[in-house]
Amino acid sequence: MNKIKLALGLLSLVGMGAWAQEAAPAPVDPAPVQAVAAETAPAAPAAAPAAAQPAPAAAVVEQAATAEAKAAPVPAVEANKQPMISVWEAIVFCVVVIGVIFLGIWKSRDEKDSEDTDKGASDYFLAGRGLSWWLVGFSLIAANISTEQFVGMSGKAADWLGMAIASYEWLAAITLVVVAFFFLPKLLRGGVYTIPEFLEYRYNTGARAIMALATLVILVGVPTAGVIYSGAKVISVFFFSSDMGSFELGLAGIAFPWPILIGCIIIALCGTIYVFVGGLKACAWTDLIWGAGLIVGGGVVAYLAMQALGSADPAHLIHSASANSGATVDSLKDADAWSRLMQLNAGDVVDGVNSAGGKLHMARPENDPDIPWTALCIGLWIPNFFYWGLNQYIMQRTLASKSLAEGQLGIVFAAFLKLIIPFVVVIPGILAYNLYRDDLRAEAVVKNAVEMKKLENSEKRAVTVIHVTDSYLMENSTEGCAFVKKNAELMKASPDVVKELDTAISALQADVADESTTMAQRSQLIKPIVKINEEFVKKAKKDDKTYAVTDKLVGFDYDASFPTLLKKLLPGTGWTWFVLAALFGAVVSSLASMLNSASTILTMDIYNKLRKDASSRSLVRFGKFGVLICALIAFMIAPFLGSPSFNGIFNYIQEFQGYLSPGALCVFLFGFFVPKCPRCFGWMGIVINAVLYGSLALAYPDMAFLNRMAVCFGVIVVVGLIFTIVNAARGGEAIVLPAKNEVSLESSSKAKVFGVFVIICTLLLYWKFW
């Protein structure tokens, strides 16, 4: 009861906040953009005392930077006269959220079963192995789609990737069908609680231990922390002002914006209380509602964004058009919303900064740093199969199926829902850039100011290289060029490099002065400047005893894309409570799922191995203790994820899982389908992959992480084949795994037909957007 009271108290804060918003005086309308006084841009740091005096060209650039800081307007963010959420909507929001949580807790209680019975652990960790297909399907979607997608994926869509980021969703549909008929039967046959447990079942205890520890570290430190941060990002952008200042960690010299820190506290507390009380069964029942609400809520935001696009000023929209789109102010005037979306983002794919090329294609150039077309052949399949087939917090739902047939139907149903997700996540991200690029720039100004404040207080200020990105140069060309020139002086660049840099800067300045060109057409002129500066950054990082390097200065905060849509579009529509409840549910559901899964691994794969005589009651109690520990660790990591060094929350989550996913996928594939693969390969495949992936990241930092995954996967497959051939030559016997028959293992013919339909739909979507 005390836990429920605490949850009620936390949610009541939302209602109080809404009352305070509505009671506050209406903000004064801002002046037009042209009349807004600019914020002073951060001045370039002084060069090191030993550096040579600036060349004349550098002096000109520095003077121009000062002039631009005084005169150039920073984009004005239009104030919203209405409160973000009205009192009545806040009340409805609280009632709905509390009601759904009570439903989950009530359904998780079974008078016949308790912590004291043998079934207590099965109930808490696997919902008593009794989930129907519709619970499995919605639970998979609710556990997967969270603010990680709505913030991270929509942010990537707002940037240069556009529709290409949808490959994570559409390839997942095919992946899920394969998992349903080739992975799930093997796992249910073994009657396992956790994914690592299968490795002991097939290989040995060492393989299980390594997989459990690696999964636990990555699960808590990467997606769990990522969900807390992305949920906090929505709260901070929607409810708080971006000028609230930051919280500094004293001697550590680290500063976090207050809104992010407050948001992390709220999300972490709510999610922890939720899973602590009800376990997986509570998650599954509430997921049924959150999963449906997510899709509807995302659809509402997409609809409102399309309406806003249809009524927006073409003169404003043209600044977000792709350089080769062919769109003009005149062509946009009489166009409807869909036609405007197509015009603004049309054009061939081009390597470069945002708006350099079209954003409505699934295939990107082979040198794309995130999703090159080569990744669609191998690289992108690896994280997909690992995530949907071997990820504990996803597969825990399918392991809880009441039968193989129910699990297969649920997985294929989730695969169909994955086809819809890009239309409610990715397209709104593209629309956010088209509609509110000035707001995204304003969010970046705040983020950059925090970094420059750190630099100002740093003892190494005079020997610090400024990490300028292409997007920063696009929006702040004069200051960015001044920073790069200072970097050249600091790093004692050769005369040839200085000459090349001066030429590139002159060309960029000429383009800026030419009012007939758009900012998008400037992208090719920025490339050589960024390339030169990246060399300065690499050199400084290698000699970190002498030099320091700032975090990246960015032109736009793309992770603010979806929160900005909510802030701009929802107030006054009557939909605010619904969309916020769906998003809150998504955060809580995903966080609860991850904490429950981390706790399951900690309990069943580690604690239960150390205390083999542990009772069901002690397992559940330790599991609840594990929830608290994992939540605390994830909360401590989450605020750091706002750093531009992570290249966005979505990239952070995907890239770090590469230390485990290629090797683990190989080990499981050999375990499933190659009976003569020796038991020692279980732990060796995982260890070799981690070492190889880290080595590639150090040796080839510019290689796309999906390509690194593909290389690692290929190497581990070769190692596995060699081990298998040697084992067979030595007369090694095939390993036959006994069936534990925890549930019925009869396959579903309906799921097979529906699975073929999902694959055909996926191929048609790729054909349309290729």
Image: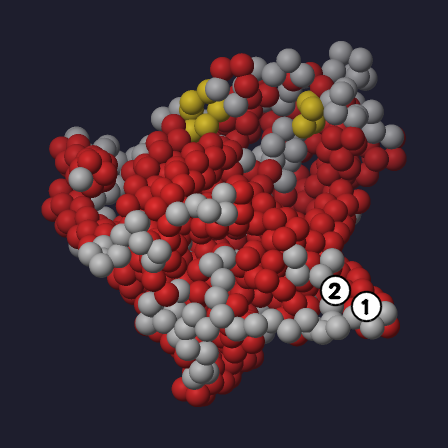
Q: Is residue 722 at least partly visible in the picture?
A: yes
Q: Residue drawn at (60%, 32%), measured in percent from left and top?
A: 551
Give the image quarter of residue 80. top left
When the figure is inspected, residue 256 is found, relative to residue 46, above or below; the finding is below
Residue position for label 1? 727
Between residues 718 and 97, which one lies in front from this camera angle? 718
Q: Residue drawn at (48%, 19%), measured in percent from left and top?
A: 249
Direction from residue 585 to residue 718 in the image, left or right = right
Direction from residue 49 to residue 423 in the image, left or right = left
Between residues 104 and 16, which one lies in front from this camera angle? 104
Residue position for label 2? 678
When the figure is inspected, residue 49 is found, relative to residue 43, above or below; the finding is above
- How far across and down, in percent of the image, does residue 120 sit? 33, 54
Name the amino acid type tagged 2.
Pro
Q: Residue drawn at (33%, 68%), measured in percent from left and top?
A: 131
Residues at circles 1 and 2 in contact by the CB criterion of under 8 Å: yes
Q: Is residue 333 at least partly visible in the picture?
A: no
Give the image quarter of residue 110. bottom left
